[in-house]
Image (cartoon, helix red, strand yellow):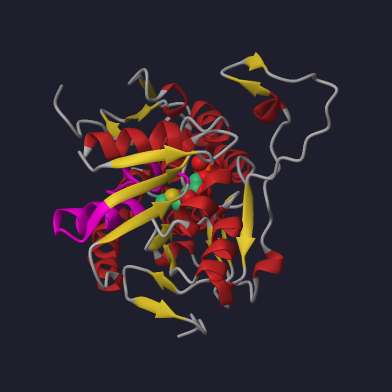
Amino acid sequence: MKKNNYFSFQLIDDKLTFLDQTKLPFEKSYIETDDCERIAKAIEKLEIRGAPAIGVAAAYALALSIKNSIKEKINSTFELAYRRLSNTRPTAVNLFSALEEMEKTYIQNKNTDNLYGVLKNKAIALHNDDIDKCHRIGKNGLAIFKKKSNVLTHCNTGKLATAGDGTAFNILKMAFEKGLVSFVYVDETRPLYQGLRLTAFELEQNEIPFSVHTDSMAAVLMKEKKVDLVIVGADRIALNGDTANKIGTYNLAVLCNFHDIPFFVAAPTTTIDRTIPSGEEIIIEYRKKSEVLSHRSMSIASDSVEVFNPAFDVTPSHLVSGIITEDQVYLFPYNFIK
Ligand code: MRU
């Protein structure tokens, strides 16, 4: 099988073709749609996931809503689609910044004959921008390697999670190609297994040596001095550097602090929320209890069990050694106001 031959989504013949990530790694199943509601559902169900990917996919969904609207109803169609997409997932700020960018383009062009064409081009520009940002994050991230390293990562931050080649994952990939990474340790990332199912898939595709462990095993790996560096992605970064990312990230940051291991966050500047001073203001998504109580649709505990299921946690910035963006590697204390 040809390696690395997959993409998260692409606009093909005015339809969004996306890879259903809930079926990975067993099935590479692409879904083709020009229906905004179907794309909103895909984001909710994590068929499309990862902060930058959600933002760009939502931009395409908004454009497609206009393609399918009759001229007289364009205003209400745009408003409804905007609201529907805003309500899919609350934490990743990329969703909201992409929708706002699309809204600006809509307001400036709403009387244009070819409104769909203009919105489509804006969504394509956001897509290309993410590709470029991922590339620059990968290059900037090389600076954090002081020696050939074993790196631990959490969740999935690769091609599947972005419109480009990934954030933290792209750093791993580019560093591996330069001989700076010897091995990758992957947190399985309960409850939805983004590490076990998706990062493992992407590492295999790139022929990078790795192993997977359950999230609770990271401490032992660190104690045994197997981990030189941790790099993760982000869903929203506050102005002081507090970082929301997949649940379990905060545990890792605390462990790194205890074991004196550098803990880096990699994200495009589109993940920085310049309206919030600290992580206190970040809205955390809570998901349904069946995600914890079942495994591949099979119950593994009684349905009567109470469940705590936040999808993200916030790591305080003093635990973050550096934030790698497409512009530069920021070091604590963070100050993103330019
Ligand atoms: O719930 P998910 O799978 O969308 O969560 C994804 C993450 O937490 C990623 O680490 C983050 O979005 C960065 S992706 C480049």
Q: Residue 65: image x %, image y %?
A: 47, 34
Q: Residue 114: image x %, image y %?
A: 33, 43
Q: Nearer the viewer, residue 82 or 246?
A: 246
Q: Residue at x 32, y 56 (%)?
A: 150
Extreme residue toward the top, this view: 298
Res. 167 image quadrant: bottom left
Above or below residue 204? Residue 101 is below
Above or below residue 79? Residue 6 is above
Q: Quadrant of the C terminus?
A: bottom left
Q: In the figure, is residue 79 to the left or right of 149?
A: right
Q: Residue at x 43, y 21 (%)?
A: 23
Asked if the magenta segment contains residue 175, the reply would be: yes
Asked if the magenta segment contains residue 208, the reply would be: no
Q: Residue 22: image x %, image y %?
A: 47, 25
Residue 198 visible in the picture = yes
Q: Residue at x 37, y 18 (%)?
A: 26
Above or below residue 189? Residue 178 is below
Magenta residues, start to end: 155-182
